[in-house]
Amino acid sequence: MIWADGSAFDRCRPRIRTPARRHPLRAALALAQGAPVATLLVLLALASLTFALFPGLDLAVSGLFAVPGEGFPLARNETLLAIRDLNRALPIWIAVALLVALLGRGVWGARSRLPPPHALLHVLGVYLVACLGIVHILKNTMGRARPEHILLFGGNKTFTLPWQISNACHSNCSFSSGEAASAMAMLALAYLAPRGWRAPVALALTLPGLVFSLNRIAFGSHFLSDVVISWLIVATTILALRSITHAYGARIDAGVDGQWREPLLGAARHVTSTGRMAWVRTRWLFLRAAA
């Protein structure tokens, strides 16, 4: 049989599809979704390299808030001081609320309508691992002087780069920023919200997180690199711990929900009984001494 129409033959012939070229931005987004922790680690390395290659970036940003002969006058602003104090108090309030909620799940279980235990432990883990762990170790190891203490801004210390070990500071130093870390850690609270509300909650928490963090730069207490690197460290910790708590979520919840009721009631009965016996004994000794 002879095909008279070449186009008919083309329609019958299997088509060979050439793979479409992916847009670089789409490829990057796909990689970020597939390996978010690795992506954040790459961003952390790139940010660190950028601040190391361009040290003037830190100095220029801090210089925006410095006044010759006065240092950093915004550090004496009462409103900004109140914002700083709020940021310092929030991690304690958040930790107490999380522990109370965890206790509630341990006593009443899922009927308490509190967030699941694995989600509560995830947020607590972020504060413990990133803020009290990684960032705290860096602050007391790297020895980077704060902007207000370096020569350029009226101090007597030498400017050093992020990740550069120095003896310019001995404790509670500039790198990296603990308060920027605790501000970023608030974003982990979004995982406590219902799935459809997580993105709006995260966006709502972003604004105070930015204000708390940039406030420290305005005070001359941290460089821009201190803040950015703390953000990336905490963001990496949030996603890394999330993958762990999500994988073992059912097992964690089963080990907590309603499992603490009987032990706590038993402990309460023991304390009550011991207290009653102590009171009777004390009363008897008092009456005997008075006789």
Image: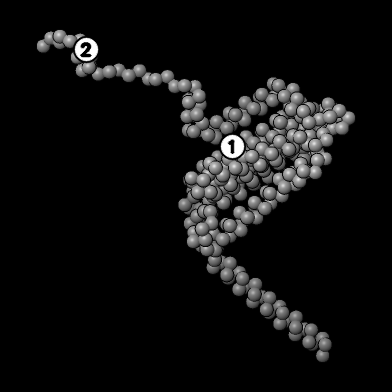
* Residue that label 2 marks: 7
In this view, which residue lies farthest toward the front?
A: 79
Q: Residue at x 21, y 12 (%)?
A: 7
Residue type, numbered disc 1 = Thr
- Badge 1 crowding class, 10 Å Cα cut-off, few under 14, some 14 to 19, many 20 or more, is many
Q: Which residue is nearer to you in this view: 159 or 171?
A: 159
Q: Is residue 137 visible?
A: no
Position of the C terminus by quadrant? bottom right
Q: Position of residue 111 (x, y in %)?
A: 49, 61
* Position of residue 255 in the picture relative to residue 157 (left or right): left
Question: In this figure, which colouring scheme has been used for the structure?
Answer: one colour
**Toward the viewer: 275 or 230?**
230
Residue 82 screen position, x and y as percent: 76, 46
Does residue 19 sit above or below 257 in this rendering? above
Q: Residue at x 65, y 52 (%)?
A: 95
**Residue name at image x 81 percent, y 30 percent:** 66
As drawn, 15 above or below 2: below
User: Can residue 5 be seen?
Assistant: yes
Based on the displayed image, in which of its 4 quarters is residue 20 positioned? top left
- The first of marks 1 and 2 along the sequence is 2
Horizontally, residue 98 falls left or right of residue 138, namely left
Assign a secondary structure to mark 2. helix
Q: Which mark is residue 36?
A: none
> Considering the image in quadrants, where does the N terminus appear?
top left
User: Residue 15 appears in which quarter of the rendering?
Assistant: top left
Q: Position of residue 130 (x, y in %)?
A: 64, 42
As drawn, the residue found furthest toward the bottom would be 291
Return the residue at label 1.
236
- The percent position of residue 3, horizontal first and vertical second, equals 15, 10
Alpha carbon of mark 1 to alpha carbon of mark 2: how far?
56 Å
